[in-house]
Every structure is written in structure tokens, then in C-alpha cells.
Amino acid sequence: MANHPVYTKLKAEAEAKGRTPYLDTADAAKCIRSVLKSTFPKTKFSVTISRYSGGSSVRISWMDGPTDEMVSRITAGFEGKGFDGMIDMAYHMDSYLMPDGSAAFAATSGTTGSLGMVEKASAWKPHPDAIRVSGHAYVFTSRSYSIAFLERTLAAYSRKNHGDELAEAIDSGAVKVEPGWDGSGHVTGAGHIRCRNHWGDMEIYREAGRRMVA
């Protein structure tokens, strides 16, 4: 199997210059797209980048498909920056880039030196041909749910928890699925939970978040 083009480019740069190469945000997005496509071929992902003063970000969004935890296990290795909310401070992370374009955490200096909560840390090289790269992008994931998937989730919750308060609210229609709307008043294709005089929306979203759609 051929090496990923981004890996090939940065490996050549590391060998030529003798230093840790920079993983540009656009290149990180290219790697993320290819790894997600090979890992979850049935799911359509949107991978977009933003650049702004002080940094950049990669945003990954999709509907149904794998859980957020499953996707985050792949995308976390591409994080070049994190944020410590305790001291309102960003911190840097290096990554290991593998020949197939996947990535894993390499090291961070953390924020404890600035009285923050993030410890200094490092990891072993996970692949003999991995190269250490330096990036500066935040990485965010966002999973939405189709109406059909949320309706199946409601039905599954009701069957599994028959007789509890939320299950009865689902059966009575007090908790149900409605179309999602964007800021312009258009239906997005995604669904959302409508609760009439009930608290159960967050519990249903937690239930949905644990379920993968094949």
C-alpha cells in the first residue's frame, strides 16, 4: 500500500532539513478525510478548515454513522492545540504521523508551568516509520442525528425501560422527534427531540450518542 502523500511530503522535509516538519491545517484535513473514509466508508463526513488570528481549526461533522467517541479516537491525534479553561490559556501538542496518514499524540509541554491543569506528557513512537510533526490546529467533531435514527432511539429506549417516567412520556407523545431547522428557517435533514413539559431530551441524546448506525 502506498504511503499517504502528506506523509511522503513531510518525511522528505524532515530528512532534508533535519527538524520536525510543520503539519499545515489543510494537510491535516486531507489526512483526516482519507482516514475517516477508509475507516467508515458508509458515512459521509464534512471536513472543513478555518484560519483566524491566533490559530486555525478543523471541524468534522456527520449524520448518524459512528459515535462521536469512535471518530474522536481517530481525529484526536491531529490536534495541534488544546485549551486549558482553568487559566484561559492555549497549549501546543505535537503528533506522530503514520505512513497511512493517521496520527497519534506525541507530546505536549502542558500548562502546569503556568499554573494550569494540563500535565506535561509524551508518548512512545507508535510505528517504526512514524514521523513527529508540529501543528497548530484545534480539532472539533460534531455528530447530528436523522429523524429516522432518533425515532428508532426513542422506540428502543421505551422498550428497554418500559414503565419508567421517560418511557411513558415517549409512549404518550410528550417526548417525540421533530425536524431540525437552520437559522434561515429551512429544514436541515437532521432531527431534534421535542419535549412537552418533560426533561427527557438530554437522556435521549445520551442514548443516541451511544448507538452506532451501520
Image (spheres, grey):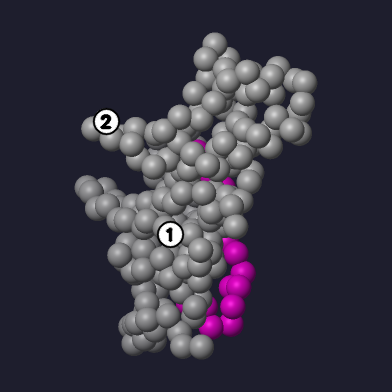
The one of 73 and 63 positioned closer to us in this rendering: 63
> For the residue carrying disc 2, how many other residues have a C-alpha within 10 Å: few (<14), some (14-19), or many (20+)?
few
Q: Tell whether 141 sits left or right of 183.
A: right
Alpha carbon of mark 2 to alpha carbon of mark 1: how far?
24 Å
For residue 135, which numbered disc appears in the image?
Answer: none
Amino acid beneath label 1? Lys
* x then y, percent, for residue 81: 41, 52
Q: Which residue is mark 1?
A: 44
The one of 195 and 173 positioned closer to us in this rendering: 173
| Residue appearing at x 44%, y 51% in the figure | 62
Q: Chief secondary structure of the magenta span? A: loop
Q: Secondary structure at mark 1?
A: loop
| Residue appearing at x 36%, y 68% in the figure | 30
> For the residue carrying disc 1, how many other residues have a C-alpha within 10 Å: few (<14), some (14-19), or many (20+)?
some
Q: Inspect the magenta stretch and tell me whether residue 118 lies in it.
A: yes
Position of residue 18 relative to residue 137, above or below, is below
Q: Is residue 48 visible?
A: yes
Toward the top, the furthest residue is 197
* x then y, percent, for residue 41: 50, 67
| Residue appearing at x 49%, y 23% in the figure | 194
Nearest to the eye among marks 2 and 1: give it: 2
Q: Secondary structure at mark 2?
A: loop
The one of 147 and 53 positioned closer to us in this rendering: 147
Position of residue 107 relative to residue 158, above or below, is below
Amino acid beneath label 2? Gly
Screen quadrant of the C terminus: bottom right
Q: Which residues are magenta?
A: 116-131
Position of residue 36 relative to residue 142, above or below, is below
Q: Tell whether 139 sits left or right of 49.
A: right
For residue 185, which numbered disc appears in the image?
Answer: 2
